[in-house]
Image (tube, grey):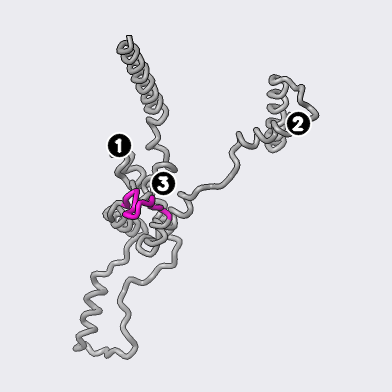
Amino acid sequence: MLQNRRYIDAEVIQNVLLKLKWGLDTRFQNIEQSKSLALCTLLDPRFKLEMFKSDTNKNAIKEHCHELMAGILSRQVPILNTVQVAPNATVSGSSVWNKVDSQLNKIRVPGTPLSKAIREMRLYLDDEILPRQGVDGKWNDPSEWWLRHSKIYPTLAEIYRSRCNIVITSVPCERIFSKAGYILNERRTRLSSSKLEKLVFLNVNSNFVKNKD
């Protein structure tokens, strides 16, 4: 009898796990297509592109990030990519350093914002993955990693600061819960649940109508 009970309990648990997995797969099947979530995953040095299942989504978020980076780079003050000759340098054609500078100027072709973005992204992806846990047993913080590497990947660091931050705010359900507490107070304890629900509904939607008008 006990063995049969254990078998039934194991079957019930397995069915619950299968339903939970089905629900997660159904609800989050297109999660990689969310640009905001995919960008946060890409710029997390612990994951980068390793957590993406679809190569199409990998390429899509990389191109999106390239566009963001190119927009930032295009607004920056252009820097001359040529070697400047020192004022006290000789201008004689026989100077060795003049020949070196001339040769370097030929190979230093100014890159476009997009090419610079692709190069910085390639360096970032080729960098080592940050372990989730450090040798001291503490969890590694991606924000601290970006603080240390902001000089190496300045454009990506700027995108991380502006798009991967945590917005501290009160969610709507908390505000509604607070309003319900104001309506159902010590002087109005005999309100029924249906009456309270209607009053909260009118209170919340009346503010929405006012803002819309």
Mark 2 — residue? 185
**Magenta region includes residue 142:** yes
- Label located before the other in sequence (2 or 3): 3
Residue occupying image coordinates x 38% and y 20%: 16
- Name the one closer to the observer, 21 or 15: 15
Position of residue 111 measured from the top left corner of the image (x, y, whole percent): 32, 63
In this figure, which residue is indicated by the disc labeled 1? 53
Question: Which residue corresponds to the image point at 29% horizontal and 89% vertical from the top-left?
Answer: 89
Q: CA distance from mark 2 to mark 3?
A: 43 Å
Q: To which residue does mark 3 refer?
A: 40
Say which of 7 and 91 sits in front: 7
Point out residue 60 in the picture as x, y percentages from the top left corner.
Answer: 34, 42
| Disc 2 + disc 3, Cβ < 8 Å | no
**Element type where label 3 sits in the image:** helix
Where 150 falls versus 83 (above or below)?
Answer: above
- Give the vertical position of 159 relative to 3 (above or below): below
In the image, the segment drawn in magenta is 130-143
Mark 3 and mark 1: Cα distance apart in space:
16 Å
C-beta proximity under 8 Å, tags 3 and 1? no
Residue 21, picture quadrant: top left
Q: Position of residue 172 (x, y in %)?
A: 61, 36
Q: Quadrant of the C terminus?
A: top right
Badge 1 amino acid: Lys
Which secondary structure dominates the residues rendered in magenta?
loop
Q: Tell me: residue 174, above or below residue 165.
A: above
Q: Nearer the viewer, mark 2 or mark 3?
A: 2
Q: Label 1: state its secondary structure.
A: loop
Q: Is residue 213 left or right of residue 112?
A: right
Q: Is residue 213 left or right of residue 171?
A: right
Marks 2 and 1, Cα distance to the nearest angstrom?
51 Å
| Residue kind at label 2, given as amino acid type | Asn
